[in-house]
C-alpha cells in the first residue's frame, strides 16, 4: 500500500470512506481480487486527502481509476 502515514481524517470522514469502499467493492464481480480492493482503498484515501467528501464521488473515482490502471 502507498504511504498514507501523514494522512489524518476525522471519524465521520472515515465513516464516509468506509461507505464508499463497501459500495465500490460490492460492484466487483466475484471472486473479488484483493489487489482490486487495495487499489480502490488507495484511491479513496488519495481522493479524500485531496479534499473530496462525497461518498458517491469517492466510489466513482475509485472504480474509474481501477478501470484505467494497467494490470500485470
Image (tube, rainbow, N blue to C red):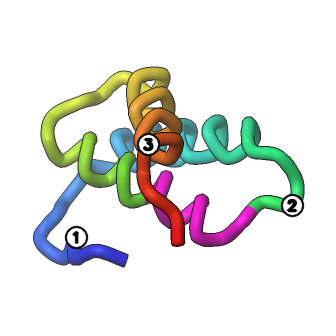
Q: Nearer the viewer, mark 2 or mark 3?
A: 3
Dividing the picture into quarters, in which one does residue 4 lie? bottom left
Q: Nearer the viewer, mark 1 or mark 2?
A: 2
Q: Residue at x 36, y 23 (%)?
A: 54
Badge 2 crowding class, 10 Å Cα cut-off, few under 14, some 14 to 19, many 20 or more, is few
Q: Residue at x 29, y 28 (%)?
A: 53
Q: Residue at x 40, y 23 (%)?
A: 57
List the single residue furthest toward the right: 30
- Magenta residue check for 40: yes
Q: Quadrant of the N terminus?
A: bottom left
Q: How many discs appear?
A: 3
Above-or-below relation of 20 to 66: above
Dividing the picture into quarters, in which one does residue 32 lie? bottom right
**Majority secondary structure in the magenta region:** helix
The picture places residue 5, in percent across and down from the top left corner, at 19, 76
The picture places residue 66, in percent across and down from the top left corner, at 49, 47
Relative side of 31 to 58, left or right: right
Q: Earlier in the sequence, mark 2 or mark 3?
A: 2
The answer for how far apart the CA atoms under marks 2 and 3 are is 20 Å
Residue annotated with mark 2: 31
Residue annotated with mark 1: 4
Secondary structure of the residue carrying numbered label 2 = loop
Secondary structure of the residue carrying numbered label 3 = helix
Give the residues in magenta.
33-41
Relative side of 26 to 58, left or right: right
Labels 1 & 3 near each other (Cβ < 8 A): no
Residue annotated with mark 3: 68
Above-or-below relation of 7 to 66: below
Badge 1 crowding class, 10 Å Cα cut-off, few under 14, some 14 to 19, many 20 or more, is few
The answer for how far apart the CA atoms under marks 1 and 2 are is 27 Å
Q: Residue at x 17, y 63 (%)?
A: 7
Q: Earlier in the sequence, mark 1 or mark 2?
A: 1
Amino acid at each position: 500500500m502507498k504511504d498514507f502515514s501523514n494522512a489524518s481524517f476525522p471519524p465521520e470522514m472515515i465513516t464516509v470512506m468506509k461507505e464508499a469502499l463497501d459500495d465500490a467493492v460490492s460492484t466487483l464481480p466475484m471472486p473479488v481480487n484483493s489487489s482490486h480492493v487495495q487499489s480502490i482503498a488507495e484511491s479513496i484515501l488519495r481522493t479524500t486527502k485531496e479534499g473530496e467528501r462525497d461518498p458517491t464521488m469517492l466510489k466513482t473515482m475509485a472504480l474509474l481509476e481501477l478501470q484505467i490502471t494497467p494490470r500485470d
